[in-house]
């Protein structure tokens, strides 16, 4: 699948901030991020949330009712960033 420019930017952010051993362009935007799929765990998501907060100017909190949906895929995460970003 083709990544949008923002999805590619977020894929780079995920790969670089979590030191993943794959190219950002190899990430499927629909692959789940948590557990199955990309295989991230809760600590990875916390680290990613901190990086997103610094880069895009909004916080992703564990008590957000949409948190499971937000981290359901790269595409969902990029969509959330697009809607909530302040930077």
Image (cartoon, helix red, strand yellow):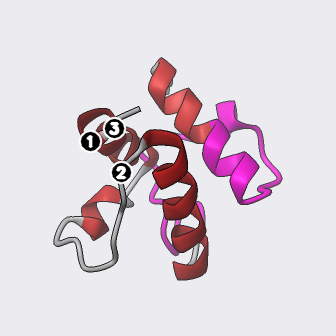
Query: Contact (CB < 8 A) between labels 3 and 1?
Result: yes
Q: Work out whether mark 2 precedes mark 3 in sequence or the reverse, and give the earlier one.
A: 2
Q: Quadrant of the C terminus?
A: top left
Classify residue 60 by image quadrant: bottom left
Classify residue 12 by image quadrant: top right
- Neighbor class of circle 3 (other Cα within 10 Å; few <14, some 14-19, many 20+) is some
- Neighbor class of circle 2 (other Cα within 10 Å; few <14, some 14-19, many 20+) is some
Name the one closer to the observer, 71 or 28.
71
Labelled disc at residue 42: none
Q: What's the magenta bit mostly, secondary-structure-wise?
A: loop
* Location of mark 1 (residue): 84
Query: Contact (CB < 8 A) between labels 1 and 2?
Result: yes
Q: Could you tell me which residue is drawn at 31 percent across and 57 percent down?
A: 70
- Residue 41 image point, x, y percent: 57, 78
Mark 2–mark 3 distance (CA, rounded to whole Å)? 6 Å
- Residue 36 image point, x, y percent: 52, 71
Question: Does residue 18 appear left or right of residue 85 in this picture?
Answer: right
Label 3 element class: loop
* Location of mark 3 (residue): 85
Label 1 element class: helix
- Residue 43 image point, x, y percent: 59, 79
Depicted 12 relative to depicted 42: above or below: above
- Residue 56 image point, x, y percent: 45, 41
Is any part of residue 70 visible from this angle? yes
Classify residue 61 by image quadrant: bottom left
Name the one closer to the observer, 72 or 55.
55
- Neighbor class of circle 1 (other Cα within 10 Å; few <14, some 14-19, many 20+) is some
Query: Contact (CB < 8 A) between labels 2 and 3?
Result: yes
Q: Range of the magenta residues? A: 12-39
Label 2 element class: loop
* Location of mark 2 (residue): 58
């Amino acid at each position: 699948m083709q990544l949008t420019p923002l999805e590619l930017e977020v894929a780079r952010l995920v790969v670089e901030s979590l030191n993943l051993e794959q190219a950002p362009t190899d990430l499927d935007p629909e692959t789940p991020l948590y557990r199955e799929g990309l295989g991230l765990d809760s600590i990875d998501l916390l680290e990613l949330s901190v990086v997103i907060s610094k880069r895009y100017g909004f916080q992703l909190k564990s008590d957000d009712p949409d948190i499971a949906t937000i981290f359901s895929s790269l595409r969902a995460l990029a969509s959330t960033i697009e809607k909530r970003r302040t930077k």
